[in-house]
Amino acid sequence: MNALNIVEYTQNLGLHAKIASAQMARASAAVKNRALLALARLLRENVEALQVDNARDLERAQANGLSDPMVDRLRLTPKVLETCAQGCEQLAAMADVIGEIIGMKQQPSGIRVGQMRVPIGVFGMIYESRPNVTIEAASLSIKSGNACILRGGSEAIDSNKALARLVALALAEAGLPEHGVQLVQTTDREAVGRLIAMPEYVDVIIPRGGKGLIERISREAKVPVIKHLDGNCHTYVDDPCDLAMAVKVADNAKTNKYSPCNASESLLVARGVAAEFLPRIGAIYAGKGVEMRGCPESLAILQAVAGAKLAAATEQDWGEEYLAPIISIKVVDGLDQAIAHINQYSSHHTDAILTRDHMHAQRFLREVDSASCMVNASTRFADGFEYGLGAEIGISTDKFHARGPVGIEGLTSLKYVVLGEGEVRA
């Protein structure tokens, strides 16, 4: 497409989405749920066909020298597709929050004032790598009564087109507008620039991808942005703690999967338990090929671990999102230093404390300034599906509107409703 065509193309996408948003907003819960269940069925019926399209993307990605974590994010395995299908079913089983009125209160004047939950309207989603985001975004858009315009990465174009075709079939089957969910069919980067600069059509932009993408969107967008820049997540091993549990959770938080933004990238250990804890977790990391970049105190303890890949941590390491088998490790005095370190270096995504001290846990929850704060659980749980949201459209580290995994409610707004019986203001 030439520049003129891109302008015309994105203009049409926006216009169609705006028209469709009115129809999506008034759709009944039964109709929306019918579309979601149809999409779940279609995903299961087309596993093999989807993997054929996905294989083209994987082959192209490897030929272009994409890193292993990026290639891993591209894969549409049967397990990934089953999770998508289950997410659609979980959403269908959830109560419909659209039209819900909350906080209705009688005022001295006689009027009653409350707030009604309504769809945002049209959201644009710009994302990289993971094609399953196409289904997560589409399903949440359907359930929340919004229209959406999706722009996936060029590396996943074949997979995204195949998934978008299934979404279109599900919408048609339920009698919803075909433009309720639209995929940008071009990989031209100019389409992104246009999409984020159409406030007349698009109500909010949600970028999901690398730091560079999100910084560009935040800088250039002319519509509101729900964002997170990166996922530098911490696991803090407190004194006192259940050491066996701490080893199990710290292992899972780092090695369950290296590429997601909710994997722990930094391990903080209270000095009182470091001598006993670090050799145990160090042996596990060494066995899995995880490089440990530590402070001098942690390296002195880890030197005795057979086969350990060790390096001195730099200042940059404390704020790094590796998305790889690398972790930074620091021994801290205790809870106060751990909280201060996390608030200084964290990306405010997800941070966890492993402790047996209830007061320490409560302080951590209150004082750590992150979208998700956890006690005695792996940071890998920071996910819309795991939180029971059915799916997520991303994880917001913003402090307004939506924070943490963004599910149905994050894609809605509240408007005031006033009920009266002829009252007039004095």
Image: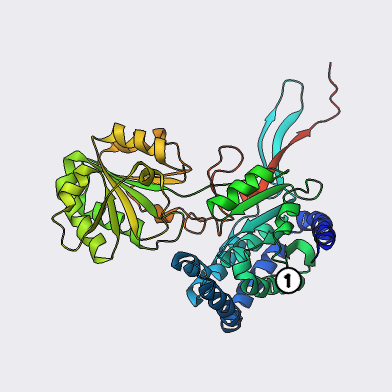
Quarter holding the C terminus is top right
Name the residue at 76% across, 24% down: 110
Q: Which sits in the foreground, 355 or 229?
A: 229
- Around disc 1, counting alpha carbons within 10 Å, would you say few (fewer than 14), some (14 to 19), or many (20 or more)? many
Give the left or right position of residue 105, taking residue 285 as reference.
right
Image height check: is 128 above or below 365? Answer: below
Quarter holding the N terminus is bottom right
Give the left or right position of residue 234, taking residue 405 as reference.
left
Name the residue at 61% across, 52% down: 207
Residue 88: percent from left, percent from top? 59, 66
Name the residue at 70% across, 56% down: 192
Q: Amino acid at mark 1?
A: Ala
Residue to which mark 1 is pinned: 168
Residue 73: percent from left, percent from top? 50, 66
Q: Which sits in the foreground, 78 or 66?
A: 66
The image quarter containing residue 58 is: bottom right
